[in-house]
Image (cartoon, grey):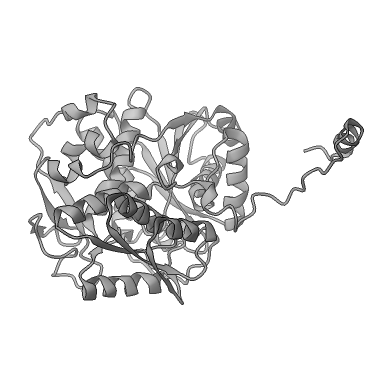
Amino acid sequence: MTTYHLTCVECASVYPPDFNGDVCPKHPGLEGILSVKYHWAANQQAPAGLVDRSQDTLRRYADLLPLNAESLHHMPQGWLTPTPLIDAPAMAKVLGVPSLRVKDEGRNPTGSLKDRSSTLAALHAISLGQHDLVCSSTGNAASSLAGICANLGLNAHIFVPEGTPTAKLDQLRMYGADVLMVRGSYDDAYYLCRDAAQEFGWYDRNCATNPYLVEGKKTCGLELAEQMAADPADWVSVAVGDGCTVTAVHKGLAEMVELGVLAKMPRILGIQPAGASPIAVAFGNATDEIHPQVASSLADSISVGRPRNARRALTAVRSSGGHLATVTDQEMLAWRERLAGASGIFAEAGAAAGIAGLAHAVESGLIKAEDRVVHIVTGTGLKDAGRIHASSTEFLHVDPTMESTRQALSNRQPA
């Protein structure tokens, strides 16, 4: 493991790895979020572990993560393996770009990118001798934490707001998590969870303030950098809620550029739902000032009115030369259906936000006709399939005869 320290994103104060806290004490609240900074030698080369492609994700990137050998020993073999980067030529044609590749994070054990951060949280908690972990979530972080805790014999305490999709709640039940349904918004669940973590001494898995969670998510960027090293993308699109995922993906890509694995940094396209877009609004106004909103979006995984990692998200997108924008719920739903029909990849509503955003970016000329694009699907569509119908199209009903079949097909309206 490479040595590291923690740095305040607000004032750059430095703290040791064993610092007892998750935010800078000079900045009460959430302004003093800490970031993990590694001590790499000048002209640092890529770790030898990258050569062994048989290794699980966290073991493979052990030299780029705040985990020691003892922590990694607890990770279940085969739990996290690289997710595929899939060519989608038919979808590229629909969008009007020469190349679209989709990194399908729905292939992770519980169906979302957040398995990466939850696994790192569980291993870090074990290294601290803690066996009770807690998080607030609209579903994906909760199910990922509950899943890895079930595997490792840890206790998962979950705070979810009322209205969380049934499919995600079903996962929590199956994994045996201790679930507290909060009569309120995600923000209400978040702050109650923070208070409970402090009162009961639980390990706080919330990605917004726990600096180690971004390190887990950044393995998506590390992995993506390797997968496209021979053919780098010009743009990488991803949905944005709290700001943690876009921050982490950018960090992973940037570290691989620094290590010489990736030749250039792609531009990041971050997309928020129009009903929960404080980070995109700040980007459009060329400011770091975030004005909280009352979040209103069907895309529960990114419906965040008070984002806690907004500063880092803005810095990440700006430093890449990228862009932050919004799309409507209707556009997300329409484009996730088009993505599924033209690629075979079924994304949850929020995970398709970047596809809708790509369509706008191509139409506006931000993304040029020759640009090569990667989109990150952050979670499987099975997460919200029971709540958000994929289409209003009626199925054909036929009798078990060829005559009935012919008649139905002949009467069908052309697509």
Residue 209 location (% of width, % of height): 25, 62
Seen in the picture, residue 338 relative to 99 is either above or below; the reply is: below
Residue 273 location (% of width, % of height): 50, 58
Q: Quadrant of residue 57?
A: top left
Residue at horizontal 20%, vertical 34%? 258
Residue at horizontal 17%, vertical 51%? 36
For residue 401, side relative to residue 125 (left or right): right
Residue at horizontal 28%, vertical 29%? 262
Viewer-nearest residue: 108 or 300: 108
Seen in the picture, residue 140 relative to 398 is either above or below; the reply is: below
Viewer-nearest residue: 10 or 384: 384
Residue at horizontal 54%, vertical 48%? 382
For residue 124, side relative to residue 175 (left or right): left
Residue 173 location (% of width, % of height): 45, 60
Quadrant the N terminus occupies: top left
Residue 305 location (% of width, % of height): 43, 67
Whether residue 137 is visible: yes
* Number of numbered labels in the structure image: 0
For residue 153, side relative to residue 71 (left or right): right
Whether residue 317 is visible: no
Q: Quadrant of residue 396?
A: top right
For residue 89, side relative to residue 121 (left or right): right
Quadrant the C terminus occupies: top right
